[in-house]
Image (spheres, rainbow, N blue to C red):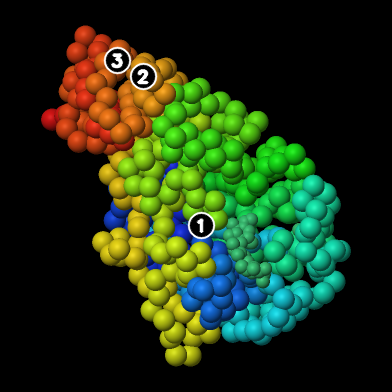
Amino acid sequence: DSSSTLRSNGDAIVHLFQWNWDSVAEECDDFLGPNGFGGVQVSPPQEHVVVPYAEGGNYPWWQDYQPVSYQIENTRRGTGEDFERMVETCAENGVRIYVDAVINHMTGPGEGTGSAGTEWTQYEYPDLFGDGDAAYSRDNFGPCYEEIEDWEDKEEVQDCQLLGLSDLDTGDPDVQDQLVRYMNELVDLGVAGFRVDASKHIPEGDMGEIVDRLNEVPGFGGTPHLYHEVYGDDTIPYTAYTPYGQVTNFDYMRDVAASFADGDIVDLTSISDHGDLSSDEAVVFIDNHDTQRYEPTLTYLDEDRYYLATAFMLAHPYGTPVVMSSYDFDGNEAEGPPSLGEVDGNPAGSITEDTDCSSADWVCEHRDERVTGMISFRNAVEGTDLVERAEQGASRVAFDRGEEGFAAFNASDDEWELSAETSLPDGTYVNVAGSGNVIVSDGKIEATLPEDGVIALYVGGEAE
Ligand code: LAG
Ligand code: CA
């Protein structure tokens, strides 16, 4: 039965980076469902290489981005059964699972044993589904077989090797069959969408052929919701991939993160087309697992200012937001997630521990009250327009969302004595992203925002 029987929460997604399947399931039950999160982006579920030690990291997190097969059976995050249970539990809570689909490439050079025990050498992956009847060999790769050098040459960017990773010939019908089988196996389990890794490196035509063959999502219904990882540039713009889903808007990330870092935010309210993408086409974020390591502008390490920027992203109607949820990597880019270490007889090498948001090892940005409060704000004001209501200097701005919500942001190191008109009905509201109540009287708000403070009020969130 493919009729939609499940209701999903709002549109906001949280990337529970490197969380194991059991921990994601528990988070859907305890926290994400009750707080109105709409989706979780999980780390790649397919069999991956096992790298005990590289670039100063123990079992680096990036193992996951080197597939050895499409078995979901054994990653460092759990078994196939754990994965299935997670998808079900999250769906029951209205939370969609988004799989990070690594479909442009397989491993780098060398040889080894994958996390589910598959022996591989570069270009030879013998047992893609653990049933012995599908394999990749050298002919399924290329046609370039060399690392990308000229990033202004579109053909090279799409046919040569990203970071030396064996580049699949995604135009090959056999390769397309395997990728579609992998993705449909996930969809049939209830996975509702994909963050497609390295989309820009897959020729658009090939992407279209793959995406066209995806099944309907059981439960939630409809075709899977896709967002493509594209670093748009002049050679390959974001819009090359918008026919096949949404795209990750790195221009938004750069502009908004930098504007908040500089305390220069008043022009951000009018965002409507960062990177030439409409709101419906864009997935937006303040940081992601790559940028927080390789080009950090604002991350959890920036504390209040980071959460202020995240609150703004959630309050503003542009794009589909993804909130990052990290573990502490202590400046070591390659460091893997907190782990139980090696488990005898388990080829995955290192098993990820259950997440504990109260330990300093896991940051859990999504549990910050400003983030959680803004998720409920966002869901309450869905579909309303933004009308700016106040501005002061470069760093302070406030707006209404229709007659349903009001939000104010102070990206400065001093208090802000805010005075603004609002369409919010008169009453006393809880500030869901700060502390205390705020009164609306005669269509006006007078309030004090602390440094880096937020006010967010909405109809339905009145004080008792
Ligand atoms: C992505 N999006 O397009 C991911 O967001 C990004 O995290 C992935 O890189 C990349 N594309 C490939 O899927 C990550 C690490 C890389 C790592 C790669 C493969 O950021 O550092 O490369 O995953 O595991 C590693 C080494 C490289 C080496 C390569 C091949 O760090 O030095 O060349 O493996 O052996
Ligand atoms: Ca490619």
The reply to whether residue 166 is in sight is yes
User: How many labels sit on residues?
Assistant: 3
* Cβ at disc 3 under 8 Å from ligand 1: no
Residue 22 relative to residue 149: left or right: left
Q: Earlier in the sequence, mark 3 or mark 1?
A: 1
Position above or below: 105 against 48 = above
Q: Amino acid at mark 3?
A: Ala
Q: Amino acid at mark 2?
A: Gln
Marks 1/2: CA distance? 33 Å
Residue indicated by mark 2: 392
Marks 2/3: CA distance? 11 Å
* Outermost residue, bottom side: 345
Mark in front: 3 vs 1: 1
Residue at 59% across, 73% down: 48
Q: Nearer the viewer, residue 259 or 102?
A: 259
Residue indicated by mark 1: 293
Q: Position of residue 450 (x, y in %)?
A: 24, 32
Residue indicated by mark 3: 420
Q: Nearer the viewer, residue 344 or 396?
A: 396
Residue at 62% across, 42% down: 247
Q: Quadrant of residue 240?
A: top right
Q: Position of residue 338 (x, y in %)?
A: 39, 71
Q: Quadrant of residue 235?
A: top right
Residue 147 relative to residue 43: left or right: right
**Mark 2 surroundings: few (<14), some (14-19) or many (≥20) residues within 10 A:** few
Q: Amino acid at mark 1?
A: Arg
Q: Quadrant of the C terminus?
A: top left
